[in-house]
Image (cartoon, rainbow, N blue to C red):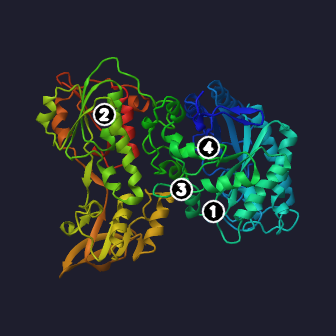
Amino acid sequence: MSTDPLLQPYKLKHLTLRNRIMITSHEPAYPEDGMPKDRYRLYHVERAKAGVALTMTAGSAAVSRDSPPVFNNILAYKDEVVPWMKKLTDECHEHGAAVMIQLTHLGRRTRWDKGDWLPVVAPSHSRAAAHRAFPKQIEDWDISRIIRDFADAAERMQAAGVDGIELETYGHLLDQFISPLTNTLEAPYGGPELDNRMRMLMEVVQGMRQRVGNEFIIGIRYTVDEDLPGGVDKAEGIEIGRRLKASGLVDFQNIIRGHIDTDPGLTDVIPIQGMKNSPYLDLAGEVRAATDFPTFHAAKIPDVATARYAIAAGKVDMVGMTRAHMTDPHIVRKIMARQEDTIRPCVGANYCLDRIYQGGAAFCIHNAATGREETMPHDIAPASQRRKVVIVGAGPAGMEAARVAGARGHDVVVFEAAENPGGQIRLTAQSPRRHEMISIIDWRMAQCESMGVAFRFGTWAEEETIIAEKPDVVIIATGGLPHTEVLSTGNDLVVSSWDIISGDVKPGSNVLVFDDAGDHAGLQAAEVIAATGAHVEIMTPDRSFAPEVMAMNLVPYMRSLQKLDTTFTVTYRLDSVRRDGNGLIATVGSDYGGVSQERHVDQVVINHGTIPLDELYFALKPQSTNLGAVDYERLIDGQPQLDVANPDGTFALYRIGDAVAARNTHAAIYDALRLVKDI
C-alpha cells in the first residue's frame, strides 16, 4: 500500500473516499437548459476515471426560482434534474469516485432581470456591487419558502444518488444572513447575536435533515474571515465552525477566506497567477485544529507538492485541486504512476473563471479538451500510419501541434526563427506577475523532447527549406507581428506595446497608450512605462478598457496602476500623431462624433493586435493537396480532414493560431489540437 499522504483513504461518516484529492464545487457553465447533460457529465467522468476521490458538481445549483443563475448554473429546483444528475453520479461511481453537489440560494448575488424576472431577495436592501441588483428585504414568507426549497432540492439530490450536499455559505443568501454587513434584520434572524444570524442556515439544514435523514452527508462551505471591517472575523468564523459541529447536523466544513461582492474581493478568494499559492492553507489548518471537524479547503493549490504538504501537515482532511484538474484531469493517475513530472501545470491564468463571469463556458487556457470531452481527447491516440509533419513556429500553436503530432507517433520537425520556443507567451511571461505563463511552453517542450520531436531553432524557414523535408503535412504557426498602422497619419511615429514589453524601446516620460485590442499587452506596456515614474494615459475607443483581460485578471493591474501616475480614458479614439519639436501631438477623436482634442506627449504606444506572418503559407499553398482549405464541418465535429482539392499537390497545408488572425492563447492551442489529433 502506498505511503503517499495524498493516496490514503478518508472516512467521512459512512463514505470512504479513496484518496485525499477532491474537486471542489465550481460551475464551469456547461449545463444545457439548466441540466447537467452529456457535456457536463463527461467533464466529471473524465476526472473520476483518472482517480479523483470526490468530484463536487455545481458551483451553486439554484434551489429557488428567485435565485436565477448568472453563470448558467444547474437548476436544482426542477424535478427533471434528477435523471441527469443520476446518470452523472452513476457513471462517476462506476469509476470509483464519490459525487456531491453544492446547493445555494444566491440572494443578492444575481439580477432581477434574469430567469423569471422576480425580485432579488436578501436580509437587507444593500446591493452586491458585482451584480448591481438592489434587493427586496426578505420577509417571513420568503424565509419559509426558501427553507422548503432547500429541502426539496436536497430530496431531489438524494433521489439522484449523490453522496452528499454542500451548502454555499459565502457571499450567497445564507452567508448574507450571517454577515453583519449584509443583515439588517431584527431578531430572530438578525441583530448582533450570532445565533440569530446563523438561524436561517440552521433552519435550512434542519429542513433538509427532515427530508434526507441523518445518514445523508451535508457539509457547509463558509467564510471564516470576511476580511472586511465590521464583517465576520476569524474568531467569529471559528465559532461558527464549532457551532456547526456541535449541532450534529453538519458533517464537514469547507473553509473560505474573504468576500466575493466585488471583483477584487472575488480575486482574493480565488487567487490568480502572480498571487501567492495556497494563501489560506494555514488558516484552514487553524480552523481544523480549533474545531476538530472534518475540513476541506481549496484556494490556488496548483501543485502536488503543496497538496501533499496540506495533508501530511494535518492542515486539511481533503485538499481541493479544482483549477488544476481543469488543466490536467489525470493528476491522481499520474501520482499513482509516479509520473508527476508529466502533469500539465495550471498557470493560474484564470481564463476558465473569467470566461464564466462574462457569461461564457469555462475553458482552460492551455488544455482545449477540458469542457469538450465529447469531441476532444485528453489522451492522444497513436496514428495508424506514420507521417512526416513539418511545423513552422514554436509559439503556443506550433508547440501544441508538435506535441499532438508527436503523441500520434509522427516524424515531427519544428522550425523556429528565434533561439527559444514560446512566441508571444515568452513575451508576456517577462512580466513577473505573468511569469507562470511560460509553463505552457516548458511543459510542451518537455513532452516533445520525450517523444523525439526535432527542433530547428534560429532557423528562418523558406519555401525551399520546407520542400527539402519532403513533408506529408505542413502546419504554419508563424504567429503575427504587431499591427500599428492604424492612424490616418503619423504611423511612423509610434511604437508597439511589444516594443515596450520586450525592452527594445525605452519608455517615455509622458506617454499615451492607445489600446483598442483590449488584451494583456496594452496594460503590460502601460505598467512597464508607469513603473519608471512616467505619466501614462491609457486610451480606448471602447466603453470599458481591456475587455479581453476580463474581470479577475484586471484586478492586479488596477492595484498596480492606480498607485502610479496613470489615467484611464474610455470612448476616445486616437486619430493621428505629428511631431512637435522634441515631442508629439496626438489628435484624439471619438466614434460618437463631434470631438477633436490634442495631447502633448513624448511617446505614443499602439496596442492593436497582430497582422499574420503568412508569406510562407501563401508561397506553399499552390503546392498543397488541399490548397490550404479546411473543412470546417469536420473540424467542428472532431473528424479528420478528407478533401483533396489539388491532386498534383505533395503535402497537406494548414495554418493555425495568429498566423490566421489575431486571437488568443487558448484559440491557438485549440486550433492545433482539433486539427492535429486526426493527422
- Classify the position of the C terminus by image quarter: top left
The x, y position of residue 281, in whole percent, is 60, 53
The mark nearer the N terminus, 3 or 1, is 1
Specify the farthest residue to the bottom.
581
Identify the secondary structure beneath mark 4.
helix
The x, y position of residue 651, in whole percent, is 21, 26
Pointer 3: what residue? Answer: 271
Q: Is residue 268 above or below residue 22?
A: below
The mark nearer the N terminus, 4 or 2, is 4
Pointer 4: what residue? Answer: 311
Task: Report the mark closest to the observer, 2 or 1.
Answer: 2
The answer to whether residue 73 of the structure is visible from this angle is yes
- Is 360 in front, or is 416? 416
Q: Quadrant of residue 541?
A: bottom left
Identify the secondary structure beneath mark 2.
helix
Pointer 1: what residue? Answer: 261
The mark nearer the N terminus, 4 or 3, is 3
Name the residue type under label 2. Answer: Glu
Q: CA distance from mark 4 to mark 2?
A: 33 Å
Task: Report the mark closest to the observer, 3 or 1.
Answer: 3
Q: Which mark is residue 318?
A: none
Task: Report the mark closest to the observer, 4 or 2.
Answer: 4
Horizontally, residue 224 falls left or right of residue 337, namely: right
**Crowdedness near tag 4: few (<14), some (14–19) or many (≥20) residues, C-alpha within 10 Å:** many
- Is 520 in front, or is 19? 19
Pointer 2: what residue? Answer: 449
Identify the secondary structure beneath mark 1.
loop
Q: CA distance from mark 4 to mark 3?
A: 21 Å
**Crowdedness near tag 1: few (<14), some (14–19) or many (≥20) residues, C-alpha within 10 Å:** some
- Is 666 in front, or is 541? 666
